[in-house]
Image (cartoon, grey):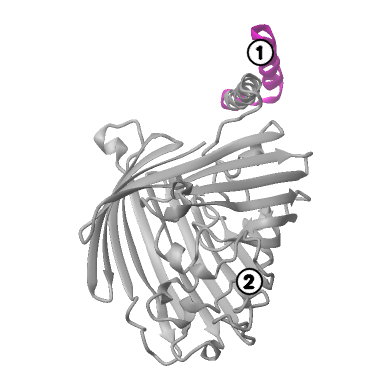
Amino acid sequence: MKRVTTALSLAAILATGVQAASLEERVTALEEQNTVLTEEVLATQTGGFTLVDTQKSYSGMGPAASKVYFSKNPLSIGGYGEMFYANPDNGDDFADVYRFITYFGYKFNDWIVLNTEIEFEHGADAGNGGKVVVEFFYLDFLLSEQANLRLGHVLTPMGLVNLRHEPTLFNTVQRPDIEKHLLPSTWHENGALVYGRFDSADIDYTVGMINALNLNSEYTRGDDTQSKWIREGRLGASKDASFEPAFVGRVDYTGINGLMVGASVYYGEGSNLKDPKATDPIQDVSGLTTTMFDIHASYDNGPFSMYGLYTQTNLDGAEKLSGNAVEKASGYYVNASYDVSSLVGLDYKLPVFAQYQDFNPVEKTVNGSNEDTFQTEIVTIGLNFFPADQVVLKADYAMKEVNNVDTNTFSFGLGFIF
C-alpha cells in the first residue's frame, strides 16, 4: 500500500511540475492530490465511509446532508445530534436529548442520487412527545449545473435554517423562534423541485411544487393555541396526508465574497383535508389561500459573521373559518457574532454572539381580537466553542418578552455532525 501511495504521489509531482507555472501552483496541486489520496485510503480502510467537509454545501444544504454528493464511494452515512439543558427563571430546569439524525445516501450512478434523513426526536419517547420521522427522502436526477430534478419527500426551500438545520450552523442553543413558528423548521413535504445554478450570474435557484399546508384547524380558529397555526399546518411524511399542490420558489445571489442574499416564496391552498367525516369539528373549506415569503441574508468575513431574515404569512379567506381566525403573521431576526479566539490566544473557534427577534404569529385576526397576546421580543446573548469543526458546545441567555410578560432562560447545549 505504501509503495502504491508513493508511486501515485511521485506521479502527481511529475505531472504538476510539467503543468504548473509557479511554486505556489505546484504546492496547491500537491495539496489537492494529497486530499484525494487520503480520502481514498480512508474510504478503503473504513469500508467506504467518508469524512464530512464542513466547507462544502450542495444545493444550499448543510455539510453532513451534502456528504453523499462529494463522496468518492456510492454509499454515504452521516448525521447530526443535539441536546441541551435549560433553566428558565419561571419554572423547573430540564434537559432534552432533542435530536439524533441519520443521513443515508447512495449513488446509483453519476447522475442519480438517493438522499435521506431520519430523525429521532426527544429520545423517541412517544409517551413524552418523542417521535421518529422521515424528514427527507428523495431522488436527485443531476442533469446539468443549470437544471436538476428532485422527486420525493423534500425540504421546503424557505428561510435560512430549514435547509441548513445542523447545529454547527446556527449560534443559539435552539433554532430561532421565528424559524420555528413562522417558518416551521424543519418543514418537509412531498413534492417535486427543479434547482440549479447560473454560475456566470452567481445565482442559485429552486422552484417547484410541494404539498400544501393545512391552515384550516383549531390552531387557526382558537385563542390559546393560535401561535402554532403555521407550524401545526405541516403534513410532512404522514401516511394520512392528503395532497394539495402548492408553489414554492427561491433565489439566492452569491456574487459578493462572503455575502449571500435571497428571497423565498410559497403560495397554496389554505385547507388541505382528506375526506373529513360529517361529525368532525373541522371540515374542508374552499376559498382559503396562503401566501408566505421571506427575505434573507448572511455574511461571513473572517472572524465576523451575520445572518437574518424577515418573513410574512397571509391567509386570505380566514373569515370563512371563524370570527377570530388568524389572517397574518410576520417577524424578523438578526444574529451577529465575532470569533474572539485570536484575542484570547485559543487555537479553537470561540464566537460570541447577540441575536434579536421581533415577531407576532397572530399579528392580525378577522375581528381584531387576540392580536397583542403573542407579540414577542427576544434578546439572546451567548457563545460557541468548537473543539473540532464538527463539534460545538453552546451557552446562551435568552431574555424573552411576550405581551409584556418577561421570561429569562439560561441554556447549555452540545451539537455535532458526522
**Residue most extreme to the front:** 279
| Residue 31 visible somewhere in the drawing | yes
Q: Amino acid at mark 2?
A: Ala
**Image: magenta residue range:** 1-26
Q: Amino acid at mark 1?
A: Thr
- Pinpoint residue 226: horizontal percent, then vertical percent: 42, 76
Pointer 1 residue: 5
- Pinpoint residue 243: horizontal percent, then vertical percent: 69, 70
In what quadrant of the picture does the N terminus appear? top right
The quarter of the displayed image where residue 343 is located: top left
Q: Residue at x 62, y 61 (%)?
A: 238
Label ID, residue 310: none
Side (left or right) of 136 relative to 256: right
- The answer to whether marks 2 and 1 mark residues whose Cβ atoms lie closer than 8 Å is no
User: Dot 2: what SS?
Assistant: loop
Q: Is residue 95 magenta?
A: no
**Residue most extreme to the left:** 89
Front one among 105 and 353: 105
- Structural distance between the alpha carbons of marks 2 and 1: 53 Å
| Residue 60 visible somewhere in the drawing | no
Q: Of marks 2 and 1, which one's residue comes earlier in the chain?
A: 1
Q: Relative to 59, does residue 104 appear above or below in the rendering?
A: above
Q: Residue at x 78, y 44 (%)?
A: 111
The quarter of the displayed image where residue 272 is located: bottom right
Side (left or right) of 234 relative to 70: left
Q: Relative to 213, does residue 198 appear above or below in the rendering?
A: above
Front one among 361 and 96: 96
> Magenta span: helix, strand or loop, mainly?
helix
- Pinpoint residue 368: horizontal percent, then vertical percent: 39, 90
Pointer 2 residue: 212
